[in-house]
């Protein structure tokens, strides 16, 4: 059965009629990673997500697969070693999606660590993460730093460094892991919200689910239940009456998106904020540069997190101080996103001092909850959870050990960056005749990997008056048929990332895509209107800071 929104009812019938070894609640990167690990070890696995995959934090991060240089300052050597080493592993699993990116670290005269401390720190960072010699950090003089980035404020720079990181698309990484889990036998549904638990002899053995599409409810039976609900982990622990001891501490982080020409940095930069002691990233991506993040305590509704005017102004001020010639204002910002870090509360620590380490809680009724952690460390977090599930519930069965280090995240995976580049070049040549640029080829390959070919083959079978519209229609058809897209926002926000990185296309083509999806999915006119209203509300959230 393909992972198509058109097969949804058959899929839900399977969920209701079978008994699973493991039920995972939450389709962010954490749940996705656990589903792939468990299914590939031979556990009969189900995953339910209340909205769309990566709807929560996993579509709202800085989109870096990084070791977290900052955590070295906090002496979190174990964390840096684990996530730092994971970068190269995840890159190998999906080289089109986890792309090496050299990061520039300018050193300020007035702030931050000195030249030598930075040099030693970065060396330790490289060694802990096992970075290859040719990719290890390179220290720069003031002149070299300014040559790398002429936009930097000249009077304040005393030198710099270049070090290795990777960039990704968090929501795409999540969906590719989910699709790979499905290929390994996991049964997975979005728009399926867990509202309560079932118990026998005070031990959990199932969950109550509401189908967000039809409004009907059903029961899912399983031996082990994992709560991977990110910022909502404590809500489910409350339903399980097990929210004792440690609890979550949610902190908000926002990013703003600018047209590339407004902040034309040559490469990703990790720079000091003049106003406080924090550091933020400016990362070029396609036709834009995005900047973030903030880190502030959050106690509001996790379902409606927005970038406030104050958040956006903080970032604009930081950019103008570091790159004085760009002179940006709020009017230059095209879009934004805001996400919540599901961290573990530590008494007396501020938002940015809290550890990013993951923790597992097991309730008396045997609900396993996991929180904290990073996108980058998803594979190791999953390994720990599945080891625990295996030990607690299946020690009489011979389960395979974790093998996700070798499971590529695509049906036709790339083997190297060189192959990705060659493929992008070929796709670029192929779409040139329709008036598309090289950037479109890069977008197609970084977003869909070799499925770009499937999308284009489809596009080429039809004649289109407007090529852009034709290509978007082909993308949405692929996403409905292969990636469980069942709403406008699934496509525009999480599969194609256009609400963040090309909002103009969304304004221009959302009506055409909506009526195409109406035909594909058999929407009533009422559903169509609801879908359009929901997308309009999400766009409003992305530019909320302007209101
Ligand atoms: P989520 O992605 O939030 O997933 C939880 C899911 O559970 C949600 O989709 C939700 O809808 C679902 N759910 C909730 N309740 C229910 C229910 N009752 N039934 C069914 N489903 C339910 N990490 C990095 O490695 N690199 C970075 O660059 C980076 N940058 C970051 C920047 C910011 C601003 C933030 C906030 C975080 C960043 N992180 C980064 C951390 C990383 O994004 C998170 O650790 C990770 O995405 C958390 O994933 P998760 O699956 O645990 O949570």
Image (spheres, rainbow, N blue to C red):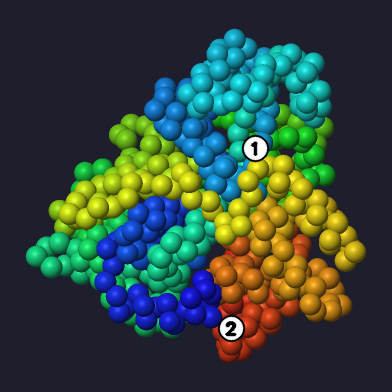
Say whether marks 1 and 2 touch (CB < 8 Å): no
| Residue 319, visible in the rendered structure | yes
Q: Quadrant of residue 206?
A: bottom left
Looking at the image, is 353 positioned above or below residue 255? above
Q: Is residue 378 left or right of residue 162?
A: left
**Residue under label 1:** 100
Q: Quadrant of residue 302?
A: bottom left
Residue found 26% across the figure and 56% down from its top: 237
**Residue under label 2:** 521
User: Disc 1 vs disc 2: which is toward the camera?
Assistant: 1
Percent across and percent down for residue 146 are 79, 22
Residue found 80% across the figure and 16% down from its top: 143
| Residue 171, visible in the rendered structure | no
Q: Is residue 517 left or right of residue 433?
A: left
Task: Check disc 2: other Cα within 10 Å, few if <14, some if 14-19, many if 20+.
Answer: some
Q: Is residue 544 left or right of residue 241?
A: right
Q: Nearer the viewer, residue 374 or 537?
A: 374
Q: Nearer the viewer, residue 546 or 387?
A: 387
């Amino acid at each position: 059965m393909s992972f198509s929104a058109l097969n949804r009812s058959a899929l839900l019938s399977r969920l209701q009629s079978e008994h699973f070894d493991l039920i995972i609640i939450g389709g962010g990167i954490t749940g996705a990673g656990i589903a792939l690990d468990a299914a590939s070890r031979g556990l009969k696995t189900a995953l339910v997500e209340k909205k769309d995959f990566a709807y929560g934090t996993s579509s709202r991060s800085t989109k870096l697969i990084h070791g977290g240089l900052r955590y070295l300052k906090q002496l979190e050597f174990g964390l840096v070693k684990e996530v730092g080493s994971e970068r190269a592993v995840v890159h190998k699993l999906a080289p089109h999606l986890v792309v090496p990116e050299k990061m520039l670290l300018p050193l300020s005269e007035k702030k931050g660590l000195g030249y030598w401390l930075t040099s030693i720190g970065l060396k330790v960072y490289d060694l802990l993460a096992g970075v290859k010699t040719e990719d290890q950090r390179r220290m720069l003089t003031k002149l070299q730093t300014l040559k790398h980035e002429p936009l930097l404020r000249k009077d304040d720079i005393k030198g710099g460094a270049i070090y290795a990181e990777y960039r990704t698309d968090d929501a795409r990484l999540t969906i590719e892991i989910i699709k790979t889990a499905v290929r390994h036998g996991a049964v997975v549904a979005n728009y399926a919200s867990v509202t309560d638990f079932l118990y026998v002899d005070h031990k959990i053995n199932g969950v109550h689910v509401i189908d967000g599409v039809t409004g009907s409810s059903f029961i899912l039976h399983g031996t082990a239940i994992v709560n991977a609900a990110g910022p909502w982990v404590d809500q489910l622990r409350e339903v399980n009456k097990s929210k004792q001891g440690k609890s979550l501490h949610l902190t908000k982080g926002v990013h703003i998106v600018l047209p590339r020409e407004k902040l034309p940095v040559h490469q990703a930069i990790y720079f000091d904020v003049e106003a406080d002691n924090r550091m933020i990233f400016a990362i070029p991506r396609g036709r834009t540069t995005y900047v973030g993040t903030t880190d502030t305590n959050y106690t509001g509704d996790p379902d409606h997190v927005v970038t406030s005017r104050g958040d956006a102004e903080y970032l604009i001020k930081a950019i103008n101080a570091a790159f004085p010639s760009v002179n940006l204002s709020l009017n230059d910002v095209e879009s934004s996103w805001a996400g919540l870090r599901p961290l573990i509360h530590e008494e007396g620590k501020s938002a940015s001092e809290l550890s990013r380490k993951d923790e597992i809680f097991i309730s008396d009724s045997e609900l396993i909850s996991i929180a904290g952690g990073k996108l980058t460390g998803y594979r190791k977090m999953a390994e720990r959870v599945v080891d625990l599930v295996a030990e607690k519930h299946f020690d009489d069965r011979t389960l395979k050990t974790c093998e996700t280090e070798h499971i590529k995240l695509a049906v036709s995976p790339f083997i190297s960056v060189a192959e990705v580049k060659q493929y992008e070049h070929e796709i670029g040549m192929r779409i040139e005749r329709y008036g598309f640029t090289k950037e479109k080829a890069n977008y197609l390959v970084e977003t869909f990997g070799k499925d770009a070919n499937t999308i284009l083959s489809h596009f080429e079978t039809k004649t289109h008056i407007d090529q852009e519209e034709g290509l978007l229609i082909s993308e949405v058809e692929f996403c409905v048929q292969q990636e469980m897209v069942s709403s406008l926002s699934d496509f525009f926000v999480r599969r194609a990332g256009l609400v963040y990185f090309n909002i103009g296309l969304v304004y221009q083509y959302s009506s055409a895509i909506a009526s195409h999806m109406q035909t594909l999915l058999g929407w009533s006119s009422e559903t169509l209107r609801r879908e359009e209203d929901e997308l309009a509300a999400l766009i409003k959230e992305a530019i909320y800071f302007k209101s």
